[in-house]
Amino acid sequence: MAPKTTAEVSMDALYRIFTVPEAPDSTLGKIEQHLSENLEGFLASHIVTQERPLHEIEHDFAYSDIPEQPEFVSDHTDVLLKKLVAQSVHTASPRFIGHMTSALPYFLLPLAKLMVGLNQNLVKIETSKAFTPMERQVLGMMHHLVYGEKKPFYDRWMHSADHSLGAFCSGGTIANISALWVARNNLLAPDGDFTGVSAEGLAAGLQHYGYNRLVVLVSERGHYSLSKAADVLGIGRKNIVSVPADDNNRIQIKELRAAAAKVTREGGRVMAIVGIAGTTETGHVDPLEEIAAIAAEYNAHFHVDAAWGGATLMSNTHRNLLAGIELADSLTIDAHKQMYVPMGAGMVLFKDPSLVSAIEHHAEYVIRRGSKDLGSHTMEGSRPGMAMLVYSALHVMGRKGYELLIDTSIERAKDFAALIEQQDDFEVITHPELCLLTYRYVPAEIKPLLAEASAEQIAVITPHLNILTRYIQKTQRENGRSFVSRTKLTPPQYYREGTLVFRTVLANPLTTNEMLADIIVEQREIAATAPSLRKHIIDAAERAGLKTK
Amino acid sequence: MAPKTTAEVSMDALYRIFTVPEAPDSTLGKIEQHLSENLEGFLASHIVTQERPLHEIEHDFAYSDIPEQPEFVSDHTDVLLKKLVAQSVHTASPRFIGHMTSALPYFLLPLAKLMVGLNQNLVKIETSKAFTPMERQVLGMMHHLVYGEKKPFYDRWMHSADHSLGAFCSGGTIANISALWVARNNLLAPDGDFTGVSAEGLAAGLQHYGYNRLVVLVSERGHYSLSKAADVLGIGRKNIVSVPADDNNRIQIKELRAAAAKVTREGGRVMAIVGIAGTTETGHVDPLEEIAAIAAEYNAHFHVDAAWGGATLMSNTHRNLLAGIELADSLTIDAHKQMYVPMGAGMVLFKDPSLVSAIEHHAEYVIRRGSKDLGSHTMEGSRPGMAMLVYSALHVMGRKGYELLIDTSIERAKDFAALIEQQDDFEVITHPELCLLTYRYVPAEIKPLLAEASAEQIAVITPHLNILTRYIQKTQRENGRSFVSRTKLTPPQYYREGTLVFRTVLANPLTTNEMLADIIVEQREIAATAPSLRKHIIDAAERAGLKTK
């Protein structure tokens, strides 16, 4: 798979790569112009809609040798377009409503290029200068959005060397790990001869404080990154105790209370309780105030995973959905989700600016003690200036702009739910609270029977409905005109039987109700191409004693 | 600090942000053109050279309220240029030789914009499709560069769902944490009733295996991220045991052997030994083969931190400096350092493709079991497609292009060392092995005396030399024409007295010997502006009984 032509290898040639810009009429120059003038057009015309099987795509990425000879940029760009871009995912498409990735505002593209060209490293002032106070300000603004402290608070802490209102990071997973790291280190803090878990390790910490284990309590709808965090931090995945959710996918407070009591009774320590502000699968929000009360009772760290839902705070119409979030000791929010910023802009926020001292690090050549280097309070070291894109988005869209986007998204989700409910052959499985909803296709002759079916009958029929759901979702994806994702839920209306559903995220402002209606039509058409799967469902219903029309 | 003018808040206005491109003659359009046509010119003309104090810059980032009203892109861009860009750091400047950040090849800028526009999420195939095999291929190429396995090896493992040759991540810190996470989980693996440290936590793991602590051995020159890793992973910072380095900043094998024996004798377990391939401060490489032998003896994980030096493997001239790296169980390398890719492209590699199964994670809605989703074997979750920039850089520059860059950098460092040695008033403190060297200014009348000074005399004079070194470095930075960083070393020639030095990284291909000569002249001129600091040095020398001319 060697390039057809090879470029010169000489210091002159390399020097040119670093000093001579790509000509406007070069392959890359033209791509850039196309991106600048019509991003949606570029994506629509370069990304192949019909899906190629992965194993075929892998053929294009099969060689393991670094090419010996340089390749001309134009040749390489042709290859990139054909092999990589053509087979990438059109995440910005308004008809692709299965991801948490939306269209991007235009102005962020040139700004991203500027950010890359500036190539700052946020680990320290020396390699980022104004980017450091800028990032601190963005964290301050987000902190203010959540906690609403007064001006003197921010005047005092926002730019303080030994404090931090939060940290930028690549995404929600690192944010969640960071929050629980802070919680762990504050719980097993230095005490007398014990120099703290940070220095002495987890086993010594448990022993010193007399706990047999640390436990994190979270609803069964919690994100998998929490279990990853428990693994990384040495707490152990089994010590993420999963608390049953109610019929609306919200943690059951009674069960939470019982779980906390049980852990404590058995000699464990409730290290943290995690509330979810927007579950990944259905977008529901836990009762945060009630969780906060229990966390306070157990003197546990209260973390809120608002990776998706946090942006809702910018809507005065809907921010009450997250009531109690201001009680969180820490909070995760991803700007690359509902804040319309490109991938790679996660944040963790801390209510108390001194909380992060539990994870403070210094070194001789960077992040010296007393410096304002951000690296002394972050899990990551060197990292890019993504905060700039959040800074710009907050200014160019303003709170009111975000409010409008968020309000519109939730309305669109409600419209879509209403549309689905009008159909004879579709049903909503979870209704939108934020802009997520799940639904599925059910043959019209089966749908009325489900409401009256017993648990046994549902258990017989559901596996067959699941097969059809999977078939529709997969075929729709392969056709490439539109996309919904799928997940497995345990809906209360179906006796908690494992039920495959279409999962949709209605955050793309370019998605219209017409497009949503088209998706319903397309899914119905796909279902019609699988008469045998439909027949299995009807057979199963009859076997289960449900009378079909 | 409210914007002077505010944009309209309406769904139409927002819709335009997502659909109407920035006009070529808009402020942002012009910036972009300038970036495209003359990146160096843009940076040179927009970044203010003379340093403003940080507390002044902070005034521009002082408000904590998210602006209510949207702002016009053009207005916002003006503000960005004035407040942020003007006060950022010119990391690409060939006269800024104190960072590990270099000029970037031109073609990466439009490609970075393309990457941002595609906005793929590498956590799963569903949101990245061809980006997943592309990233796996880049990891395969890097693996091949280090380990040189044969084609069937890569045919079998590179695209295998349950295996992984490594992981992309934001930077070397996450890479080092990931490597030690894998090492920890493999050491305390499931065994009989014990379901492994991942599930049961670190305390249970230590107890099951009967170790009183896990220890990581690394030279005293190890990067601070290793101590951060020990904290995060629950091992404890004090269990990073620092082994003395020799006169060339390389780990002392005898001391390493003694430390490993001591840990084991006392009931601890040597979990990992870390070799450094390019220390952050001086660019020296540990004797990797000898470390590997000791790691094998203790059945410990052998990790190599080649964040900086790994790229040297692309030079056939110099790759022997890293002999033994192919024995590493895991390895960290940052493409945003000596591979000339923008910030945010760290990698960890694993010799054995099944090693990562110790950190495998799955969930119902993403990274399902058996899928090829990258997220099942990475510490991060959602993350951007930075691998594309590495892919392109490897193809456009080729191994031979990188070889030339690396060879030239090392030569330039040697030239600079020779130049410094010719001066009456400068001295090299550490000679370059890779392209890093450290040096300092010493008044001409003092320099000849240092070679004969006793430890006591050096102890008297060094603090005063340090003050001058700091003054020169700080003034030079503030003047903004050029930049070297500084760190504190304990040079053997000066009885290991804590000595401040100028630290330089000569990786920017645009740096010339003339620029280096200019830096010497500039530093000498700055030194001349501090007669009182020079006098203190001379006084101290006399006090110490050193006869000045």
Image (cartoon, coloured by chain):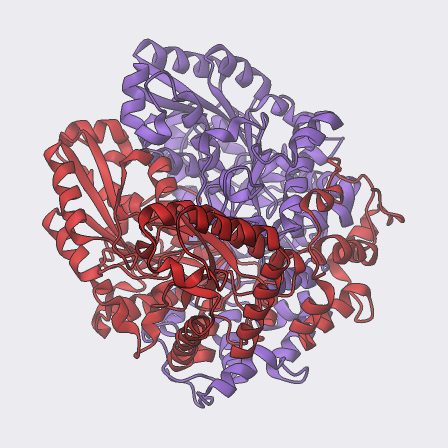
Chain colours: A purple, B red
Q: Is residue A533 visible?
A: no
**Left or right of residue A56, residue B109 in this image:** right
The answer to which of B12 and B279 lies nearer the viewer is B279
**Left or right of residue B88, residue B414 in this image:** left
On the image, which quarter does residue A497 sit in? top left
> Of all residues shown, which one is farthest toward the right?
B5
Q: Considering only vertical position in the picture, is A448 above or below A5? A: above
The answer to which of A94 and A242 lies nearer the viewer is A242
- Count of numbered marks: 0
**Left or right of residue B325, residue B529 in this image:** right
On the image, which quarter does residue B132 sit in? bottom left
The answer to which of B493 and A140 lies nearer the viewer is B493
- For image coordinates 65% across by 83% down, the residue present is A23
Instruction: Pinpoint residue B128: horizontal percent, then vertical percent.
Output: 48, 59
Instruction: Pinpoint residue A198: horizontal percent, then vertical percent.
Output: 37, 30
Instruction: Pinpoint residue B271: horizontal percent, then vertical percent.
Output: 21, 42
- Specify the quadrant that holds the N terminus of chain B: top right
**Left or right of residue B511, residue B136 in this image:** left
Q: Considering only vertical position in the picture, is A287 above or below B68? A: above
Q: Is residue A453 visible?
A: yes
- For image coordinates 75% across by 52% down, the residue present is B83
Instruction: Pinpoint residue A375: horizontal percent, then vertical percent.
Output: 51, 44
- For image coordinates 53% across by 63% down, the residue present is B342
Q: Considering only vertical position in the picture, is B249 above or below A66? A: above
